[in-house]
Image (cartoon, rainbow, N blue to C red):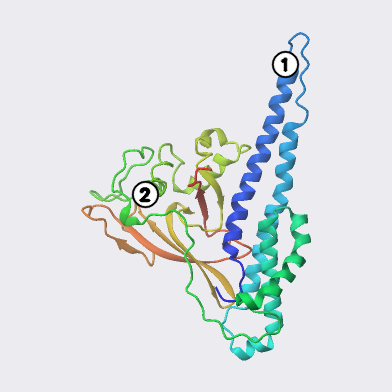
Amino acid sequence: MSHTCSAEPERLFSYASYATTLDGQLEAQGRRLSGIVQTFERGCRESGLRLSTGTAGEGLASYAKDNLLGDQKVREVGLSFARADAQHMASPSASTWRNEGTQLSTRTWKRAAVVASFVLFPGVATAVWLIPKIYGFLRSIGQDTGIPRLGVEQPAPTPEPQKVVSAPTVKAENIPASDSAIQAYEHQSQAAGVLSNCTWYAAAAVRAASEGKINVGSYSLGDASRWAVSARAAIDETHKEHNTYKRYQDAISSVDRMPSVSSVYCSGDHVAFVEEVRYLKKDGKQLAEVVISEENYYVTQVFSGSKPVDIPDHPEVKRWRRTKQFEIVDGQIPSGQGEFIHLNYDGS
């Protein structure tokens, strides 16, 4: 990243998405706990025994609700960074940096102070209190660390190559042509003798990326058009279909419109596996360049820009890879362009 950026907005978006999902789950569990203990208290009839659990469940739910405000604040901070970056995409000349040196350096230090405060002290009030203090400290050491100081002319920065967001992943070439553990979907296509099916492939890719720990093909999430809905039901205890899909509650971390590596991209009646994600800035816009791999039951209807992937020793398997580009608006891709199912690969 250039010197105009002291944070990676996409990482803040990813954290906020995961954290707010956990907050919702924790609040729901707190409400559920409260109901259970109240039922237990009412039913306790042991002679001489009076039991009161107080408001443990309500306290847990309240804590989760309060924590949600802080996690939403992280997303807001990420949005502020993304907007600031979009305004300073081009690599300015040295003279431009001289004229704007105070403004750019002040922005850099303030951003660093915000990030450090929230990382060191997650409590919103404490972090806000610390921002000006950390800001002053960072400014004082700027010259020694080589980071721009206020009013000091800086050479034009050399753009760094875009970074691929790291996460456990596999490539289409390494996903097996068959997997007996995936029983909910058949590996076949409309063409005789050709193996290609988007739902089977997405399940196989997730299983491979998780080293066999996550199998969303053991029980059907429905056809491709239903995957995002079913995944959301799995993690939302208030959803009317939660009981149907709750077996995947621990495997799925969230469903949103922010791409991540090794997630499942859901669009219309199709699903695909995300192999890479790059974040770019172009014409004043923040973009996500997403590399996906896929199979397609309708093998004669290949998506535009797709390139075939050769599977060694299995010419009957038809897979493709393509790159899609999305504009990031308010921390996510626009509505109607698809959703992403994020898997809990670390098992926490």
Q: Position of residue 321 (x, y in %)?
A: 36, 61
Looking at the image, residue 136 sits to the left or right of residue 173; the answer is: right
Would you name the residue on which mark 2 appears?
201
Do the residues under discs 1 and 2 have CB atoms within 8 angstroms? no
Q: Is residue 278 above or below residue 22?
A: below
In this picture, residue 193 sits left or right of residue 233:
left
**Residue furthest top in the image:** 47
Q: Residue at x 70, y 49 (%)?
A: 68
In this rendering, would 132 be left or right of 96? right
Q: Quadrant of residue 336?
A: bottom right
Residue 301 is at least partly visible in this image:
no
Q: Provide residue 36's location: percent of width, then percent of height.
A: 68, 26
**Secondary structure of the residue carrying numbered label 1:** helix
Q: Position of residue 348 (x, y in %)?
A: 54, 43
Give amino acid for label 2. Tyr
Crowd class of label 2 (few under 14; some 14 to 19; many from 20; radius 10 Å): many
